[in-house]
């Protein structure tokens, strides 16, 4: 599909990312705003048991999607891969829409991440406005992305190491506090599992579990960065399957373990999004400065996720331009292989953060994560469909030649598609998140219309490149 020109441009991306970078890039994209902030909203909405079940379903969904993506990415390792798969195996218009949806996922997630980081900073500096911190963090994240891809990968690797260690400490210390091995503040008794059981299994019914599925999927979003980075990964045939397997196992352990600890230590009526539930938990544990230390780690973790988000959205915009559906200026790379213009435009997500933090950080934050969650679930839907049609059109010899095959075809892509679709439908039942449908569906329609008008531009660009 690539023209000579686009191939030349693509070859300027250097395969500098190793397996450890790929694993930590994926973990870094996931362990961020969704885990550190959205968990409070999910516990408050679905209850403790409901939140645990929602995250178990979310883990299953992301596992199914990543199995599909793994097969596609090993067979066709490309930068900005999702929309090229959708273009080939669904339709060009779908591919175009998927690219813009994923760009929307991360630019909006960038906004919510920066807002969350600003809210964390208010824990220490309550008189300083959130938007000021957002502006500072915008500059920092932009700087980290425009040096080199290897510098970005290495910085993200160490950011993610800090997050992983912190999550492990939280689970261990939290479990100790639950059963009285670590004292609670003000001589409060050990909670054991009372906060999980006191309100009943489903205090608000079963519906909130479905309502919060998009928020859960938003928390898991970032695992698919493995596919985005495939074109810049050394030895993708070995690196991608290993990264997928390792990432999924760690995510299930971290997320489910974390939710159980949070739900045990945080009463349902105290959970929300203004303050991270992690900080609230450590405020109640009798460890000196624990809340301050954890708040600092959360700030770095959220900025790490924002760092990954800007990387992803910049590469997706580059990929659109590289295929001729955006002006060529967005595909230009610096001498160090950085798509500077694409990254700068994608930084617009930071402006969303400034807007949301000024208007209403508590309510707009939930809306931002819902829009981002809807967009990523739509992308996951396309991955499942692409994988289904990719495998279907292969001959037996081609199937046997695949270096990585997702198991249980066609069950895996079909179940993944159904669960993602249910998550999108669940948005309609939550007034706080319904805005994601009001914004997301028209956005999809506009993208298909825009693709119709860019087709002629794309054909002219391909024709000129061949001359």
Image: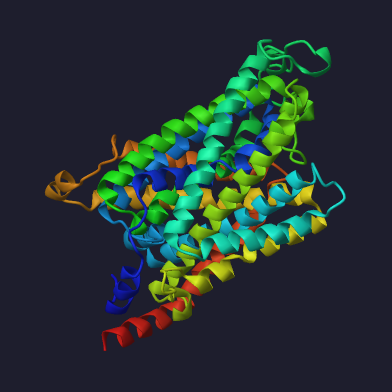
Q: Is residue 219 visible?
A: yes
Q: Is residue 313 above or below residue 430?
A: below
Residue 285 percent coordinates (x, y): 74, 21
Q: Is residue 397 above or below residue 269?
A: below
Above or below: residue 103 compared with residue 402: below
Q: How is the image coloured?
A: rainbow
Tell me where residue 337 appears, x and y as whole percent.
Answer: 41, 69
Quadrant the C terminus occupies? bottom left
Q: Residue at x 63, y 21 (%)?
A: 173
Residue 291 located left or right of residue 103 = right
The image shows residue 74 at horizontal and vertical percentages of 28, 50
Q: Position of residue 28 (x, y in %)?
A: 51, 45
Looking at the image, which residue is at 72% across and 57% down?
134
Q: How many marks?
A: 0
Q: Quadrant of residue 168?
A: top right
Determine the residue located farthest toward the front in the rendered image: 288
Name the residue: 46% across, 57% down.
Answer: 151
Residue 168 lies left or right of residue 240; in this view the side is: right
Please identify the residue farthest to the left as the structure is shown: 397
Residue that lies at the very extreme toward the right in this rendered image: 127
Residue placed most toward the observer, 142 or 430: 142
- Give the side of residue 63 with respect to residue 219, left or right: left
**Residue 44 seen in the current view:** no
Query: Where's the N terminus, which quadrant?
Result: bottom left
């Amino acid at each position: 599909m690539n023209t000579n020109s686009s191939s030349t441009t693509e070859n300027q991306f250097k395969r500098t990312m190793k397996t450890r970078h790929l694993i930590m890039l994926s973990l870094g994209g996931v362990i961020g705003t969704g885990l550190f902030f959205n968990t409070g909203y999910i516990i408050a909405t679905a209850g403790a048991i409901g939140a645990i079940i929602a995250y178990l379903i979310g883990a299953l969904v992301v596992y199914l999607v990543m199995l599909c993506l793994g097969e596609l990415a090993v067979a066709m390792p490309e930068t900005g891969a999702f929309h090229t798969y959708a273009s080939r195996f669904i339709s060009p218009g779908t591919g175009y829409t998927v690219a813009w949806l994923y760009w929307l996922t991360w630019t909006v997630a960038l906004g919510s991440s920066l807002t969350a980081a600003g809210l964390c900073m208010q824990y220490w500096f309550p008189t300083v406005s959130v938007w000021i911190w957002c502006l500072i963090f915008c500059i920092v994240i932009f700087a980290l992305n425009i040096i080199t891809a290897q510098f970005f990968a290495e910085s993200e690797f160490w950011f993610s190491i800090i997050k992983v260690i912190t999550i492990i400490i939280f689970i261990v210390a939290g479990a100790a506090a639950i059963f009285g091995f670590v004292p609670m503040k003000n001589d409060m008794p050990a909670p054991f599992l009372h906060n999980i059981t006191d309100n009943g299994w489903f205090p608000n019914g079963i519906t909130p579990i479905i309502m919060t599925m998009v928020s859960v999927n938003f928390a898991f979003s970032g695992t698919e960065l493995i596919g985005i980075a495939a074109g810049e990964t050394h030895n993708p045939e070995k690196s991608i399957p290993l990264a997928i397997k390792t990432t999924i196992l760690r995510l299930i352990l971290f997320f489910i373990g974390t939710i159980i600890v949070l739900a045990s230590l945080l009463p349902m009526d105290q959970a929300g999004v203004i303050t991270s539930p992690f900080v609230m938990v450590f405020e109640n544990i009798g460890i000196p400065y624990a809340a301050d230390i954890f708040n600092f780690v959360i700030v770095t973790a959220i900025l790490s996720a924002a760092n990954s988000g800007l990387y992803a959205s910049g590469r997706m915009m580059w990929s659109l331009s590289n295929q001729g559906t955006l002006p060529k200026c967005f595909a230009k790379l610096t001498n160090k292989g950085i798509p500077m213009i694409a990254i700068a435009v994608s930084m617009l997500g930071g402006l969303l953060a400034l807007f949301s933090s000024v208007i209403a950080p508590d309510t707009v934050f939930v809306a931002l994560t819902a829009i981002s969650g809807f967009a990523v679930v739509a992308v996951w839907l396309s991955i499942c469909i692409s994988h289904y049609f990719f495998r279907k059109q292969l001959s037996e010899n081609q199937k046997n030649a695949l270096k990585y095959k997702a198991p249980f075809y066609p069950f895996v892509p079909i179940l993944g598609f159904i669960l993602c679709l249910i998550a999108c439908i669940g948005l309609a039942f939550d007034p706080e998140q319904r805005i994601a449908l009001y914004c997301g569906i028209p956005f999809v329609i506009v993208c298909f219309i825009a693709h119709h008008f860019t087709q002629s531009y794309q054909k002219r660009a391909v024709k000129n490149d061949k001359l």
